[in-house]
Image (cartoon, grey):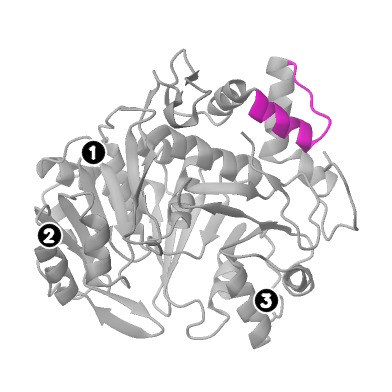
Amino acid sequence: MTGPTEPQTPLWRPAPARAAATRLQQFLDTLRERHGLVFSDYAELHAWSVRESEAFWRALWDFCGVIGEPGERVLVDGQRMEHAQWFPDGRLNFAENLLRRRGPEEAMLLQVEDQPRRRLSWDELYDEVSRVAQLLRSYGVQPGDRVAGYLPNLPETAIGMLATAAVGAVWTSTSPDFGVESVIERFGQVGPRVLFGVEAYQYNGKRHVLGDKLRRICAGLPSIEHLVVFPLFGGPVETPGVSWHEALAGFRASEIEFEPRGFGDPLCVLYSSGTTGKPKCITHRVGGVLLQHLKEHQLHSDVSHDDRVFYFTTCGWMMWNWLVSALASGATVIFYDGSPFFPDGNVLLDLAQEEGITLFGTSAKYIDELRNRGIVPSRGRDFPRLRTLCSTGSVLVPEAFDWVYENFKRDLCLASISGGTDIISCFVLGNPLLPVYRGECQCRGLG
């Protein structure tokens, strides 16, 4: 499958064997076998996915094996975007789809700067979500209620979000470097009943204790009925509220009772940047987030079972949501919290090498900083499992494309992607079947 034009020599093109094994090629094969659809190139596939959007999204639901009932109708009132209803009869649970895999294999890994790495298996992840979901129900949390996280980039942040989704409630989060007023500005608009926090976080080698901040946030948010604080560094929790371990002590892991939700029911609330006044709430929906992320992971990023996905992000950015959703494809999610240059600029590169990361997500700014510091990723490393490098946050300049292929890895799909908080996903993406050209994004997202 080729692009419409090839004005220059590509920096990378997938080998035939690699292209044939991609999830995107498997999707094309499925469309041909089940529906008799054949496309000569990606532009033709994209045009079909927009023109016949109902057929595309229904085919994606089936291809990705979404757990739930799609219902008979795919789209109602589709000519009026703000009134359109997708899968109006559909019923599913977001967390159930992310927790479909079980077993002793690794589901999550955490590194906090120079701290020891921590690992959770799929079974351990499921059990922790089960216990937190029971806790939320004991607090009286109902479908549609809001639960907030003022947390670093931890497995427990994802566990809180998954438990919230499991009981049908709505998740919202900010990272702990946000000031008290910024947090109150955001959370005050949604009225969370439960707040998950942390006693401290670390950045650039320095511990930042949050007890006073948590007290002021709770005082400024009268809707909060319960504060649960995770002891990230293992010591006693000298904060208001109850410690994570104490709160969960009375609950034993069991099969999760996933609350069925409508496709268009709210899943999470993100916030605009606040550059034009107060940050504005943006509500994202259960089915839309799941399908969009499955599409972007499996078709555009070639993520599948046993891949290891990393994105440098905080839980105040939509790429955190994007990262966690990789669980729905059976991939291991790798979290890093702290400065990407502590103790030096090798920390994320060593993580990628040692943990066999297959998709490495970062920003154009990070790549520029590596260049400016004279750090050569391939020096002493070969990244044998790495297939895709995603860059977002700002434009990846042509010279940075050259630098990546000269200093990172030659056989690499370099995907310069762009999206936004308003869609919790991407407008332009990578493509494992298309070549990479200097200074260019590969393609528009399907659908």
Q: Which residue is mark 2?
A: 246
Q: Secondary structure at mark 1?
A: loop
Q: Earlier in the sequence, mark 3 or mark 2?
A: 2
Quadrant occupied by the N terminus: top right
Residue 48 sits inside the magenta stretch: yes
Q: Are marks 1 and 3 in contact (CB under 8 Å)?
A: no
SS for callout 2: helix
- Residue placed at 55% from the left, 55% from the top? 308
Please give the range of residues in magenta. Answer: 36-51
Residue visible at 20% across and 41% down?
Answer: 145
Residue hosting label 3:
377
Residue 214 versus residue 152: which sits nearer the camera?
214
Closer to us: mark 1 or mark 3?
A: 3
Q: Is residue 225 left or right of residue 91?
A: left
Question: For the point 48% across and 86% down, which residue is it?
Answer: 343
Instruction: Tell me whether circle 2 and circle 1 mark residues in contact (CB < 8 Å).
Output: no
Across and down, in percent, residue 234 comes to: 23, 73
Q: Amino acid at mark 3?
A: Pro
Q: Quadrant of the C terminus?
A: top right
